[in-house]
Image (cartoon, rainbow, N blue to C red):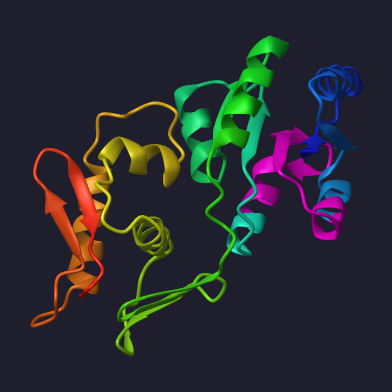
């Protein structure tokens, strides 16, 4: 049975969400504060987090950012009365996988929960070795044939995503959704900028090319033969 943690201080809203999720066949735990949520997350494995931003003891995104920094990548649906574009982007950048402004229809919440639970789980391994690459996701480090790549957190996440999908064309839309967490596609070249920096760090002078650009389609990670 899927286990979901609902972090919501409004008792009525929390009860409605719990009843709907339980009716859909999920096991649900509830926390009304950051402190109680942190204790539950540390003591149990959850398949999904649903968290409100405005909690009595602080900002829900602070908990989410801390979990991401510690290498926990449980999918998270952020709920908030703060529904502006800037607020949604802030929630996604803090580590949210989706953002649902309040008030919302429960049927939409359930649909978003089902969509998040359908996503493939890429978090089973925290140490990845692919050819000359060695990624330690918990330590936040990556090397190529012993050479420290000095990756920024977003670059490490991009490389992790690519390494898990060798030989596949990874589109910009896929990266925006799965690495940046955007449920919409902004008019920006952020993917190309980050991928350009990543490729320069991974593929040094005289080294076999591991990441290549597929014109008009995206990028491919090629394992060396």
- Figure quadrant of the C terminus: bottom left
Above/below status of 78 relative to 102: below
Is residue 56 found inside the magenta-colored segment of the image?
Answer: yes
- Figure quadrant of the N terminus: top right
- Label count reads 0
Is residue 204 shown to the viewer in this render? yes
Between 26 and 198, the residue placed more toward the observer is 26
Q: Residue at x 29, y 87 (%)?
A: 145
Residue 158 x/y as whole percent: 36, 57
Residue 66 x/y as whole percent: 65, 57
**In the figure, is residue 86 to the left or right of 10?**
left
Q: Residue at x 41, y 37 (%)?
A: 177
**In the figure, is residue 54 to the left or right of 90?**
right
In the displayed orientation, state which residue is furthest to the front: 225
Above/below status of 111 relative to 156: above
Q: What's drawn in magenta, residue-wise?
A: 39-65
Q: Residue at x 57, y 28 (%)?
A: 115
Above/below status of 120 relative to 183: below
Above/below status of 166 relative to 208: above
Residue 65 x/y as whole percent: 61, 52
**Quadrant of residue 185 in the image?**
top left
Is residue 104 shown to the viewer in this render? no
**In the figure, is residue 186 to the left or right of 55?**
left
Between 203 and 83, the residue placed more toward the observer is 203
Between 85 and 118, the residue placed more toward the observer is 118
Is residue 81 found inside the magenta-colored segment of the image?
Answer: no
Residue 98 x/y as whole percent: 55, 32
């Amino acid at each position: 049975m899927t286990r979901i943690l609902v972090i919501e201080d409004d008792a009525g809203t929390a009860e409605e969400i719990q009843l709907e999720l339980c009716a859909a066949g999920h096991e649900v735990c509830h926390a009304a504060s950051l402190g109680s949520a942190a204790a539950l997350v540390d003591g149990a494995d959850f398949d999904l987090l649903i968290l409100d931003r405005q909690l009595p003891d602080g900002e829900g995104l602070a908990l989410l950012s801390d979990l991401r920094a510690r290498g926990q990548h449980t999918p998270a649906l952020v709920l908030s009365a703060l529904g502006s574009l800037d607020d949604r982007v802030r929630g996604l950048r803090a580590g949210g996988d989706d953002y649902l402004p309040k008030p919302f229809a429960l049927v939409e919440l359930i649909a978003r929960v089902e969509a998040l639970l359908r996503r493939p789980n890429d978090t089973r391994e925290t140490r990845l070795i692919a050819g000359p690459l060695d990624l330690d996701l918990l330590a936040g480090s990556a090397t190529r044939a012993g050479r420290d790549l000095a990756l920024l957190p977003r670059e490490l996440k991009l490389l992790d995503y690519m390494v898990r999908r060798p030989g596949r064309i990874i589109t910009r839309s896929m990266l925006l959704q799965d690495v940046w967490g955007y449920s919409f596609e902004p008019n920006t070249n952020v993917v190309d900028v980050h991928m350009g920096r990543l490729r320069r760090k991974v593929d040094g002078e005289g080294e076999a090319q591991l990441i290549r650009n597929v014109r008009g389609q995206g990028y491919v990670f090629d394992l060396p033969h």
